[in-house]
Amino acid sequence: MLKLIISGCNGRMGQAVAAVCRADNSIRIVAGIDTNTVKLCDYPVYVTPMEYGGSSDVVVDFSHPAALPCLLSYCIARSLPIVLCTTGYSEDELTLIRSAAEKIPIFKSANMSIGINLLLALVRQTAEALGGDFDIEIVERHHNKKLDAPSGTALMLADAASEGLKSSPQYIYERQSFRKPRGKNEIGISAVRGGTIPGEHEVIFAGSNEVIELKHTVYSREVFAAGAVRAAKFLAKQTEPRIYDMNDLLFGEVS
């Protein structure tokens, strides 16, 4: 049975992961990590991972970038693989992740949805086919509690489009501070925050007298939780220290 630690266990996504695990007889949650130590489920909750002295096979993190250094130190000390689902990392934090991946297996994705990761491939192919003849705009919509904007997934989609283009585009996050026509070498990224929207991403390819739209909508957080649990099962079997992603999981690039 897979022994799992949930970081950010009392948040919306942490509770969604717990719900998926409860329905899976092959997984047991052995501990939760959260600044709020209220016990919402049948496992102990700690402020820091160092407080847990038991055994575990893998950690799933749906918390906050501020928790990253402590989590990585804990996992490195115990040779534990970790699934990083948190977004909004700084460049310094990304450097920490790359350094830790030299010692332990790390699964990192800004979006754990299978559909989104297939959308990434479609966006890359569409940008390559259309070249620079179509303007590319990305609109992402999330609930009013989400902290980072634009979303990590929106940036992944922008990167996918960029990979399909011959030139390196400039990412534009707002246009109100200047008055000028849209440049051809731009990818616009807009963020909407409101209500309880779990997640919606739309990539618009706007050409002369025609528009192509690629869109993905999530109706439940269970989509991300199920993907994270699937990633945890996958990562627990890996022994090579490096950064793994959804391509490894979906397309079987590693055993």
Image (cartoon, rainbow, N blue to C red):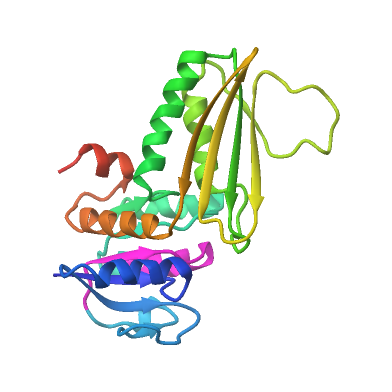
User: Is 89 covered by the magenta stretch?
Assistant: no
| 33 lies left or right of 139 | left
Quadrant containing the C terminus is top left
Q: Is residue 67 magenta?
A: yes
Residue ID at (45%, 81%) = 47
Depth order, front residue of 197/241: 197
- Please tell me whether residue 14 is drawn above or below residue 205 in the rendered image: below
Instruction: Give the position of the N terminus as an image quadrant.
Output: bottom left
The boundaries of the magenta stretch are: 55-75
Task: Identify whether 179 is placed above or below 165.
Answer: below
Q: How far across and down, in percent of the image, does residue 253 sit? A: 21, 37
Residue 114 image offset from top left, x and y in percent: 34, 44
Residue 183 coordinates in the image, percent (x, y): 72, 21
Q: Residue at x 42, y 53 (%)?
A: 97
Pick the front one: 234 or 116: 116
Q: Residue at x 42, y 22 (%)?
A: 125
- What residue is rendered at 30% in x and 66% in y? 20
